[in-house]
Amino acid sequence: MAASDVTDAEREVLDQLWMNGPAAVRVLAEWLSTAKRPVIAPTVLKLLERMEAKGFVSRDRQQNPHLFRAAVSRDELIERRLQALAGDLCGGSIVPLVSCLVERGNLTEEDRQAIRRMIDEFRDDSDSSVNS
């Protein structure tokens, strides 16, 4: 795993921050805890410190207790992970990944329509930038 990648535990923290917004360590520990897997604040703090060093979260030191927020969006993380996967498996090209998802992804009609809209929007944006 690259130093710039996130672990499963780090992704769970990001999921909570994306869903709920900035939070203190104890609040995050509560959000992450389940009946089968309690999570304690010192463990979450260590995780957040690692994530801060990697640039995935930022800390507001003006607040007491400190508030942590996601420093990357879900889309940014998806892009990083797909680029890394494309680099590892496809010589850097993302086309084989997209082809695999489209051909074998059991796409619903709604998924196909959303993909068509994205392609059309991209095409429209490309056409307008060329004509400008």
Image (spheres, grey):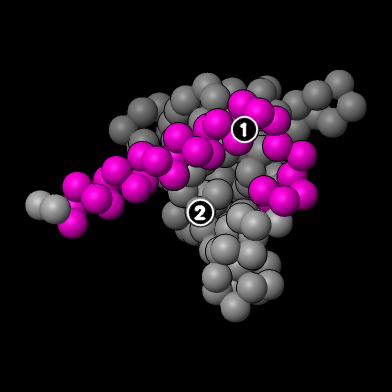
Instruction: Compare residues 48 and 8 and report the one nearer the observer.
Output: 8
How many marks the image carries: the answer is 2
- For mark 2, does the 10 Å Cα neighbourhood hold few (<14), some (14 to 19), or many (20 or more) residues? few
Question: Residue 126: within the magenta?
Answer: yes
Sequence order check, earlier mark of 1 and 2: 2
Instruction: Compare residues 21 and 88 and report the one nearer the observer.
Output: 88
Q: Quadrant of residue 33?
A: top right
Residue type pointed to by label 2: Glu
Which residue, given by chain and number where applicable, does mark 1 sit on?
A: 111
**How far from the left and from the top, in percent, is residue 31?**
66, 23
Residue type pointed to by label 1: Asp
- Please report the bounds of the magenta region as a residue range: 101-130
Measuring 55% from the left and 31% from the top, which residue is drawn there? 113
**How far from the left and from the top, in percent, is residue 55?**
45, 54
User: Which residue reaches farthest right?
Assistant: 36
Which residue, given by chain and number where applicable, does mark 2 sit on?
A: 79
Measuring 53% from the left and 39% from the top, which residue is drawn there? 115
Please say whether residue 6 is visible from this viewpoint: yes
Instruction: Compare residues 96 and 116 and report the one nearer the observer.
Output: 116
Measuring 62% from the left and 26% from the top, which residue is drawn there? 110
Measuring 80% from the left and 24% from the top, which residue is drawn there? 34
**How far from the left and from the top, in percent, is residue 71?**
42, 44
| Quadrant of the frame with the N terminus | bottom right
User: Which residue reaches farthest bottom?
Assistant: 91
Instruction: Kindly report the distance in space between the C-alpha atoms of the residues bearing marks 1 and 2.
Output: 19 Å
- Could you tell whether 8 is left or right of 50 in the image? right
For residue 108, above or below residue 88: above
For residue 39, above or below residue 104: above
Label disc, if present, on residue 119 of the rendered structure: none
Instruction: Compare residues 19 and 109 and report the one nearer the observer.
Output: 109
Secondary structure of residue under mark 2: helix
Secondary structure mostly seen in the magenta stretch? helix
